[in-house]
Image: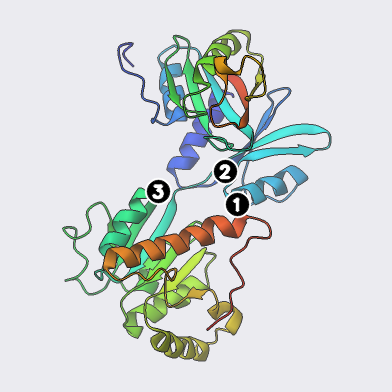
Amino acid sequence: MLASEPTRPDRDPLDAALTWLSNGHKVALATVVRTWGSAPRQAGSQMAVRDDGDFAGSVSGGCIEGAVIEAAQDVMNTNVPRKLDFGVSDADAWAVGLACGGRIEVFVEAVR
Amino acid sequence: MNIETLKTIQALRANGQALVRAVDLQSGEELLIDPQDDSSELALAARDAARADKSGPVEIAGRDWFLGVFNPPLDLVIVGAAHIAQPLAAMAGLAGYGVRVIDPRTAFATAARFPGVAISHDWPDDALAKAPLGPRSALVALTHDPKVDDPALATALRSTCFYVGALGSKKTHATRLERLKSHGFDSAALERIRGPVGLAIGARSPAEIAISILAEMTRELRAGNEVGQTSRPRTSS
């Protein structure tokens, strides 16, 4: 895969992960495991993240992808899975909050 | 996720096979589970998740697992390349179905009228023997011709498909049920057939009727999975 290829959130995250791995990239996979209230993507939704921050798929309507990509880059190096919790109840919710008012738990693991 | 797991998932998906991946949310340990498997509590939970097409967390023996469901695409079989079949095929495609049209009358089911649709000119029971209906399948009979519709409906009733619909007035439907009854189907089986087909939304044009059918299919598929919200049983009229 060319580095210049644009990010396509609609492509199959598992397909993308396989392609990236075969091209020598590090890859992590984020999965929505639990949702409360109104959440944009249901449990099972996945996003593959490449070491350079490129990604495929989605875990929300775009609200938390930035934070998930950052955590994924950490996880692909440590190989220690992480659970991330996003909601609107935090005081700093504006930073990575969900505008819809829901809450999402995301599991992030390395693919190797 | 192990790369070998990833390759297996993609190979099974390409092959149209359902599978569930269980991952321990603490350790990251993973298992691939065949939803036909019922040999453990985890496998049973995976089977239920696959049936409901719903990924989600489950706690078993003090461990937090996440069950990720990878189901094959939804499958819609339209029997009869009637007027309604065209908008129904197009709309169902948008809703994520792989669509097949079966019509032994070769003049009706043509690639020009049904772009992107798998067309079979076999008789329905033959076509459905070659590519059987499964729990992700819906069948809608549209020909009005008992010679074509009846074998299709009989095959559907013997299958695990989630939706069976048949076009026709209440009167047509009543005589259809009588015929199928004489073929040995009891009233519980016959109640699976949605006829007159579609939700009663006052649909008139072929496209509107297609909307009502697709809406009813969606309700059977989704609402039927919610505990206490099943759309069945429905009183027959």
The subunit letter for the residue under badge 3 reads B
- Relative height, residue A11 to residue B131 (above, below): above
Which kind of residue does numbered mark 2 sit on?
Leu
Residue B131 in picture, x, y percent from top left = 41, 61
Q: Residue B64, can we see it?
A: yes
Mark closer to the observer (3, 2) = 3
B69 relative to B167 in the view: left or right: right
Identify the residue at image location x=42%, y=29%: A15
Residue that numbered label 1 is attached to: B52
* Mark 1 and mark 2 on one chain: yes
Q: Which amino acid does label 1 sit on?
A: Ala
Q: Are marks 3 and 1 in contact (CB under 8 Å)?
A: no
- The quadrant in which residue B169 appears is bottom left
Residue bearing the label numbered 2: B19
Most foreground residue, A6 or B179: A6
Q: Which element type, helix, strand or loop, lies under badge 3?
A: loop
Image quadrant where residue A75 sits: top right
Which amino acid type is marked by label 3? Gly
Q: Residue at x 26, y 62 (%)?
A: B86
Marks 3 and 2, the one that precedes in the sequence: 2
- Image coords of residue B106 (percent x, y): 19, 71
Marks 3 and 2 in Cβ contact (< 8 Å)? no
* Label 1 – label 2 distance at C-alpha: 13 Å
How many marks on residues? 3
**Residue carrying label 3:** B96
